Image: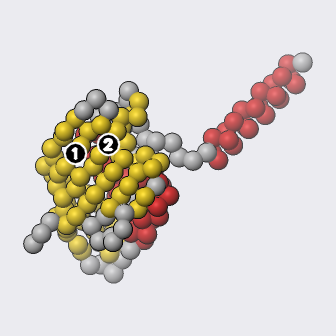
């Protein structure tokens, strides 16, 4: 009996592990609006869409500075960050001044950031930008981006 029970337990554990691997990425645990900005900058630096999907809501909206139309929904946002990440060898975002307008479940964040990129041909871009984010508290310890707009600073 012990051998059969142990085999069943191992089979259930293996099936559970496969199920977890097949599930979509879970939201990254972000407990404050300030930590959400840090998580966004860290995910941006990866040059991939998948890490970004962990900090946006499923129905989020992203309107990037050069886009004619917003990316709506997590799949479109993932595609945006995958596409823009392909063009660079490395990139980073440094959040500058921010202003928070907190409410119980929603916080508006506006601020500035420096977006740096090194293209695959070696060219370097340093862009000053302004941004706004509407972030929501999805649970006691989880904040996520609901709406995000970025535009380059006027010259």
Where is mark 1, residue-wise?
Answer: 109
| Residue 11 against residue 22 in the figure, above or below | above
Name the secondary structure under disc 1: strand
Write the residue at 9% across / 72% down.
Answer: 155
Asked whether residue 94 appears in the rendered view, the answer is no
Q: Is residue 116 left or right of residue 54?
A: left
Mark 2 closeness class: few <14, some 14–19, many ≥20 residues within 10 Å: many
Q: Is residue 23 left or right of residue 151?
A: right
Q: Evaluate if marks 2 and 1 touch, with contact meaning CB atoms under 8 Å apart.
A: yes
Q: CA distance from mark 2 to mark 1?
A: 8 Å
Mark 1 closeness class: few <14, some 14–19, many ≥20 residues within 10 Å: some
Q: Quadrant of residue 67?
A: bottom left
In percent of width and height, residue 125 lies at 23, 72
Which residue, as the protein is rendered here, is positioned at the far front?
A: 69
Which residue, as the protein is rendered here, is positioned at the far left?
A: 155
In percent of width and height, residue 36 lies at 31, 42
Q: Quadrant of residue 89?
A: bottom left
| Residue 54 against residue 152 in the figure, above or below | above
In percent of width and height, residue 110 lies at 19, 49
Circle number at residue 135: 2
User: Which quadrant of the rendered structure holds the N terminus?
Assistant: top right
Asked whether residue 26 appears in the rendered view, the answer is yes
| Residue 152 against residue 109 in the figure, above or below | below
Name the secondary structure under disc 2: strand
């Amino acid at each position: 009996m012990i051998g059969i029970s142990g085999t069943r337990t191992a089979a259930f554990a293996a099936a559970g592990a496969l199920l977890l691997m097949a599930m979509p990425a879970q939201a990254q645990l972000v407990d404050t609006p300030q930590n959400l900005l840090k998580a966004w900058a860290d995910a941006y630096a990866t040059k991939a869409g998948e890490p970004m999907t962990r900090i946006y809501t499923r129905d989020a909206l992203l309107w990037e500075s050069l886009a004619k139309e917003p990316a709506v929904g997590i799949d479109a946002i993932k595609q945006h960050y995958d596409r823009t990440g392909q063009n660079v060898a490395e990139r980073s975002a440094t959040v500058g001044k921010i202003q928070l307008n907190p409410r119980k479940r929603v916080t508006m964040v506006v601020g500035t950031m420096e977006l740096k990129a090194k293209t695959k041909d070696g060219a370097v871009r340093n862009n000053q930008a302004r941004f706004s984010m509407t972030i929501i508290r999805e649970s006691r310890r989880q904040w996520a981006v609901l709406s995000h707009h970025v535009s380059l600073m006027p010259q």
